[in-house]
Image (cartoon, rainbow, N blue to C red):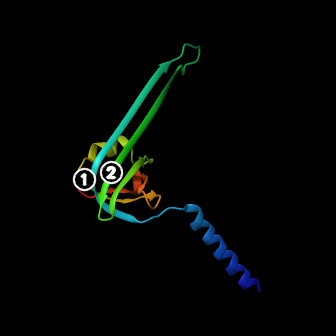
Amino acid sequence: MKTNLKKLLGTIALSGVAGISGCAEEYKTGTVIKEVESIVVAQQTIKSNYPCDKYTCRIATYLLQIQTSEGIYTASIEPTYERTLEALALVIEEGTKVNFLMYYSQPDKVGTIYANELEILE
């Protein structure tokens, strides 16, 4: 009885994890057909008696459209500790072949690629 209960709970837990993720996870290979980047840095000085009297605001976006054998995928690239958006923007250009793991909604092929899951092939 306990063994069956453990199996049932394990199956429910795995089903729940798969259901929560709600995204397809598989590596794909393709060619970058469009690249859009926008990096904005704003700095403002505040008059005060404290040594840290200024702050910096940084907003960065980096988007790729990638042609694969299954169609065009559009992705927002999220930076990681190991790979910044600025560094990727320097080495990726239209025509670059990439291997990527993308988290997306099924029908529209729009989603997110984390920078450490994007491999530059050529």
Q: Amino acid at mark 2?
A: Gln
Which x, y percent locates residue 38? 37, 36
Point 42% across, 29% down: residue: 41
The residue at the far front in this view is 107
Q: Is residue 5 left or right of residue 69?
A: right
Q: Earlier in the sequence, mark 2 or mark 1?
A: 2
Question: Do the CB atoms of the residues marked 2 and 1 lie less than 8 Å apart?
Answer: no
Q: Amino acid at mark 1?
A: Thr
Which x, y percent locates residue 101? 40, 60
Point 42% across, 37% down: residue: 60
Q: Which mark is residue 75?
A: none
- Between the residue at mark 2 and the residue at mark 1, the CA separation in whole angstroms equals 11 Å
Which x, y percent locates residue 62? 38, 43
Point 41% across, 40% down: residue: 61
- In this view of the protein, which residue sits in the foreground, 110 or 3? 110
Label 2 sits on residue: 65
Figure check: 74 above or below 106: above
Label 1 sits on residue: 96
Point 71% across, 79% down: residue: 6
Q: Secondary structure at mark 1?
A: loop
Give the class, few, some or many, for how many residues have Cα within 10 Å of label 2's Cα (few <14, many ≥20): some
Q: Secondary structure at mark 2?
A: strand
- In this view of the protein, which residue sits in the foreground, 49 or 30? 30
- In this view of the protein, which residue sits in the foreground, 11 or 56? 11
Q: Is residue 42 left or right of residue 98?
A: right
The residue at the far bottom in this view is 1
Q: Where, quadrant-wise, is the C terminus in this rendering?
A: bottom left
- In this view of the protein, which residue sits in the foreground, 93 or 119? 93
Give the class, few, some or many, for how many residues have Cα within 10 Å of label 1's Cα (few <14, many ≥20): some
